[in-house]
Image (spheres, rainbow, N blue to C red):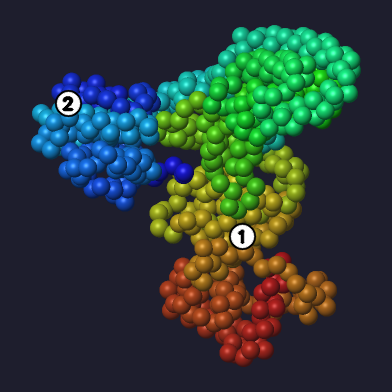
């Protein structure tokens, strides 16, 4: 049955409610599990409360719905089973005015279905119980907020210490009571802190090694026992073969009618194999409830070992082969919970590591009874924070998210010394180096120039840095009304909420100035079309390719010579927007009358009719080649 959808309220321990002396509640049936929690208190006198429960409630009832002949039928079994099916956490039965005592059949049903049953005394009202639940919830919420606040403060203080990355990981591991690890861009563990995933430390490792030695010794004993059984079987008469076949059939059915000699050999091998499994299980500190996770078919290790021994013995194989092979299989294939948790957490980190649009930024899972979480760090460098803890409290996600933000800031400069490389590139440029000479310090390959304009808020350093982080690049320049970002070409820019972006074509360092012009014009185009992002058009074959670039540029310069740069830019934008006055005004951030005046001035200086499509085509050709 899937977990019930419980209300988004902090859980309250049932033991805390029972500890309230003013209520006088007493548990009279069901498991006395200290881990039982409730999320709500609900009163209902319906014979079938299932449709009215969300799950996790303490259901309160005075038994008004109970018929007189309920004790002789299945009424209480049906009633309690429906509460359990709805996900109810506990049942509170009020004494008086309907019932003086809790019906015995109800007590038995709650024991059968393992539903905690509370006796509510006559002086305690149901509203008083609900108020107590709310008070405990408020206390839990306050304690959780205080815990999160203290954790935030301690994480911020850790980030200012020497070796801040490991300091933040240590503080995070301490706050969640588990293990915190930082994975590098290639998936390797670069730093970790806290208790190891198996939670046992060096003593468990020593115990595991001792158990492996013991298992090897037991394998030898099993082999000896198997050889003895094999010799005994070889000396038996032909009718023993029939008895062996009967034993084989009986073994498959797990019945107790195996012949004496076969039964002794099979029992010895099964018991010794089970001891190997138990020793290995102790070394791995696997609990009984974790056995289904670590056993292939969901069976307990002892049963699996015995079954394997019986199956191989029934198949006619020598007992020593069964025992020794099984021991080797356990030693070779068995992995402790720590290995399982580490592998699962590394796999979860690979899920959130940035790989393209749609990649989740966080993910959770559970392995070997350990709660796992992974968070992609926002620096865009491929670092991932992994967390493993034996339990998961409501505030753990918030605490881990704060740590992820701090680690994003701390690791943004750490990959391959990128911060030092950028500093070297800046110094060399200031000392007169050419851009193409310092570009290798920033990374190999082509680059994109992105121009961004905020839709509402003014440009400020914080907003500019946030845009650079979102695009995955720290190379940000804040100008008067636009933010320029230099982005590696393999990181495809995506639309960003609250921004209008223009993206250039991929360019090498030598062509960065031309790419900057392309990005500026792409931004103007995006503004005019009210699009969140516009990319500089990709080149495709055209008639203009039939001309040599030199001839085309000479013709463009001669034709556009009478125009000043502002007039040429206005004409280019106006033609690109199909002569729209309003959209051109928006793209250039000027009044529409200013656009009309400039276009009229262009027509006069060029001595041509701009309404003629042939003229427009020729001018567009010149403007396109003149910008190269």
Helix, strand or loop status at disc 1: strand
As drawn, 14 above or below 66: above
As drawn, 206 above or below 584: above
180 or 214: nearer the eye? 214
**Between tags 2 and 1, which lies in front?**
2
**Left or right of residue 451: residue 421:** right
As drawn, 225 above or below 5: above
**Left or right of residue 113: residue 485:** right
Label 1 neighbour load within 10 Å: few <14, some 14-19, many 20+: many
Which label's residue is closer to the chain start, 2 or 1? 2
Q: Is residue 317 visible?
A: no
Mark 2–mark 1 CB contact (< 8 Å) = no
At x 56% / y 46%, what residue is drawn? Answer: 360
At x 73% / y 69%, what residue is drawn? Answer: 539
Q: Which residue is mark 2?
A: 23
In terms of image quadrants, where is residue 128?
A: top left
Q: Which residue is mark 1?
A: 503
6 or 594: nearer the eye? 6
Give x and y (percent) for residue 472.
Answer: 60, 46
339 or 112: nearer the eye? 112
**Badge number at residue 257:** none
Residues at marks 2 and 1, CA–CA distance in whole angstroms = 68 Å
Task: Check the picture and name the quadrant holding the C terminus.
Answer: bottom right
**Left or right of residue 499: residue 186:** right
At x 54% / y 58%, what residue is drawn? Answer: 495
Give x and y (percent) for residue 403.
Answer: 49, 31
Give x and y (percent) for residue 227.
Answer: 85, 13
At x 84% / y 11%, what residue is drawn? Answer: 228
Label 2 neighbour load within 10 Å: few <14, some 14-19, many 20+: some
483 or 491: nearer the eye? 491
Q: How many marks?
A: 2
């Amino acid at each position: 049955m899937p977990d019930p959808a419980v209300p988004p309220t902090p859980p309250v321990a049932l033991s805390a409610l029972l500890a309230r002396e003013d209520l006088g509640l007493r548990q009279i049936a069901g498991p006395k599990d200290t881990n039982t929690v409730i999320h709500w208190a609900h009163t209902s006198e319906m014979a079938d409360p299932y449709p009215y429960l969300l799950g996790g409630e303490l259901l309160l009832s005075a038994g008004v719905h109970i018929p007189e002949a309920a004790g002789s039928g299945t009424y209480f079994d049906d009633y309690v089973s429906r509460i359990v099916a709805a996900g109810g956490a506990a049942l509170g039965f009020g004494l008086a005015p309907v019932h003086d005592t809790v019906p015995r059949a109800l007590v038995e049903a709650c024991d059968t279905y393992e539903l905690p049953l509370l006796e509510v005394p006559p002086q305690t009202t149901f509203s008083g119980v609900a108020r107590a639940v709310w008070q405990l919830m408020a206390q839990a919420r306050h304690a959780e907020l205080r815990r999160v606040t203290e954790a935030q403060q301690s994480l911020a203080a850790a980030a200012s210490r020497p070796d801040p990355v490991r300091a933040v990981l240590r503080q995070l591991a301490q706050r969640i009571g588990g293990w915190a690890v930082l994975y590098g861009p290639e998936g390797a563990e670069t730093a970790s802190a806290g208790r190891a995933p198996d939670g046992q430390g060096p003593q468990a490792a020593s115990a595991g090694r001792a158990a492996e030695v013991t298992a090897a010794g037991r394998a030898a004993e099993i082999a000896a026992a198997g050889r003895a059984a094999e010799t005994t079987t070889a000396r038996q008469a032909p009718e023993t073969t029939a008895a062996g076949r009967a034993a084989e059939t009986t073994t498959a059915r797990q019945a107790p009618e195996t012949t004496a000699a076969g039964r002794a050999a099979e029992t010895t091998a099964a018991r010794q194999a089970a001891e190997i499994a138990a020793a290995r299980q102790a070394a791995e500190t696997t609990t009984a409830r974790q056995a289904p996770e670590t056993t292939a078919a969901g069976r307990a290790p002892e049963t699996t070992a015995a079954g394997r021994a019986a199956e191989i013995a029934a198949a006619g194989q020598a007992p020593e082969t069964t025992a020794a092979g099984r021991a080797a299989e356990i030693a070779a294939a068995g992995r402790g919970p720590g290995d399982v948790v580490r592998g699962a957490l590394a796999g979860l980190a690979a899920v959130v590591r940035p790989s393209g649009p749609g990649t989740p930024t966080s993910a959770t899972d559970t392995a070997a009874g350990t709660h796992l979480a992974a968070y992609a760090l926002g620096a865009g460098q491929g670092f991932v924070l992994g967390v493993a803890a034996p339990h998961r409290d409501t505030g753990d996600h918030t605490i881990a998210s704060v740590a992820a933000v701090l680690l994003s800031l701390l690791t943004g400069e750490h990959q391959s010394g990128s911060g030092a490389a950028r500093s070297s590139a800046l110094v060399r440029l200031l000392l007169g180096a050419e851009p193409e000479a310092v570009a290798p310090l920033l990374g190999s390959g082509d680059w994109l120039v992105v121009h961004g304009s905020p839709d509402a808020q003014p440009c400020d350093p914080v907003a500019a840095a946030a845009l650079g982080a979102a695009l995955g690049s720290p190379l940000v320049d804040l100008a008067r009304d636009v933010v320029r970002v230099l982005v590696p070409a393999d990181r495809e820019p995506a639309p960003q909420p609250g921004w209008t972006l223009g993206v250039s074509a991929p360019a090498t360092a030598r062509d960065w100035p031309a790419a900057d012009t392309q990005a500026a014009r792409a931004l103007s185009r995006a503004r005019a079309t009210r699009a969140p992002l516009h990319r500089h058009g990709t080149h495709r074959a055209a008639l203009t390719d039939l001309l040599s670039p030199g001839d085309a540029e000479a013709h463009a310069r001669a034709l556009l010579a009478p125009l000043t740069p502002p007039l040429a830019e206005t004409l280019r934008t106006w033609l690109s927007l199909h002569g729209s006055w309003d959209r051109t005004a928006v793209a250039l951030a000027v009044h529409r009358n200013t656009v009309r005046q400039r276009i009229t001035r262009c027509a006069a200086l060029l001595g041509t009719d701009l309404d003629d499509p042939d003229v427009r085509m020729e001018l567009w050709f010149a403007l396109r080649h003149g910008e190269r």
